[in-house]
Amino acid sequence: MTFWRQWRVRIILFLAVLGPGFITANVDNDSGGIYTYSQAGAQYGYTLLWTMIPITLALIVVQEMCARMGAVTGKGLSDLIREEFGLRMTFIVLVLLVIVNFGNVVTEFAGIAGSMSLFHVSKYLSVPICALIVWALVVKGDYKNVEKVFLAASVFYIAYIIAGVLSGPDWHQAMLETVKLPPRGVWKDHAYVYMTIGVIGTTITPWMQFYLQSSIVEKGVTVRQYKASRLDVIVGSIFTDVVAWFIVVACAATLYTHGIRNITDAATAAEAMMPLAGKYAFVLFAAGLFNASLFAASILPLSTAYVVCEGMGFESGLDKGWKEAPFFYWFYTLLIALGAAVVLIPDFPMVKIAILSQVLNGILLPVVLIYMLKLINKKELMGKYTNSHWFNAVAWATAAIVIGLTVVYVWNLVLGG
């Protein structure tokens, strides 16, 4: 009886803190991410699946550090950077993040427009309506209600797993490529390196770390709930990368197999899939894209507003009213309005913006990781909750690998390789 009571308490505790880790990891499979995974599958088949296991491990480690810092300090990441490294360095990071995040916001609204066009709805109707829905959800709701909506949206990613199964992949080949490293020769292909950086950049993004830590703080998670919060991070990270794996597999099994190597966006991937994998796979892929884009169009501006307000010392939070946190809500509103407006510009180069934003994520990530590692290893800040040697090794390795891939890409580009 005691055993079952202990497990019941653990489950209740886990459900109480469930949210920040699961939501943050899943929103990472946004419009830009789905496009990047789709392009990886269409262009290289199953050969980029090897990235999923190390990326999942790195994602768990990086996200866990943020959850731990939030629970121990009760402060957001940009707040800690400002306090520990000064306003000047914080301002530089904020400017870079706002630029990268705005590119991502534009990509989300492009995903909404593309997915709804598959169901014959004009972007001039879908984008303004969805922008208004996204704005009202956050501005008019409190943290608990908004979190419930975000959790429901996270579960809907199962659509991509089903679409992957319906696409009829070569399961043996997919499993083999997941655990096998690619041949050395591929690193001479700068397009392959570019795509690898994009996959890493869209799986572990800078904004995620800021949003997760802010959510942990706003939810009121403390050291007492830390273990349950860590489980939330682990479950979310594994689930999101399983979804990513199935997106790559679905496009490898359909588009790559039938010689469709290049796609213009995630919506095109869904459209091209219909005659190859059937109507149901198409509907699931397209509906999943709409859900992911709408979900991320809510989170990304919210994350950016958190980052800027914490870094500059302004009031922020969904449980505060417009009068208590005016800059927070005005900045959120501005990001949504501008992001939606850009998508409505005729002939705007969405594809270049989408893939570039993912690569910029990959380039900016090491900067954020270095700040995080310096913060979490400060004993006067974290006490006994500083990083273990193993955690430090994985986090530093992640930063080093991303920097290395970026250098290889630029070197190949300069040489015209």
Image: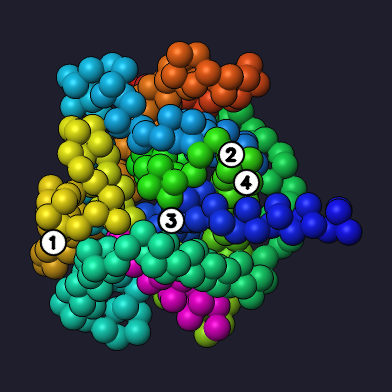
Residue at the disc numbered 4: 228
Instruction: Determine the residue positioned at 42% across, 25% down.
Output: 372
Residue 79 to residue 132: above or below: above
| Label 3 element class | helix
Tag 2's secondary structure? helix
Report the number of numbered marks: 4
Asked whether, in this view, residue 250 is left or right of residue 351, the answer is: right
* For residue 267, above or below residue 349: below
Residue assigned mark 2:
224
Q: Earlier in the sequence, mark 2 or mark 3?
A: 3
Q: Measured from the top left, where is residue 260 in percent x and y?
A: 47, 63
Give the Cα distance between marks 4 and 1: 37 Å
Give the labeled residue for mark 1.
337
Mark 4 surroundings: few (<14), some (14-19) or many (≥20) residues within 10 A = many
Task: Give how far across and how far down residue 51 sits, in percent.
Answer: 59, 41
The residue at the point 29 percent across, 67 percent down is 141
Residue ID at (67%, 65%) = 169
Circle 3 packing at 10 Å, graded few (<14), some (14-19), many (20+), is many
Residue 159, position as x, y percentages in the image? 55, 72
Task: Say what amino acid the circle numbered 3 marks.
Answer: Val
Of labels 2 and 3, the one closer to you:
2
Hey, what amino acid is under mark 1? Answer: Ala
CA separation in Å, label 2 and label 4: 9 Å
Of labels 4 and 1, earlier in sequence is 4
For the residues carrying marks 2 and 4, which lies nearer the camera in this image? 2
> Whole-percent x and y of residue 191?
42, 39
Residue type at tag 4: Ala
Where the N terminus falls, by quadrant? bottom right
* Mark 4–mark 3 distance (CA, rounded to whole Å): 20 Å
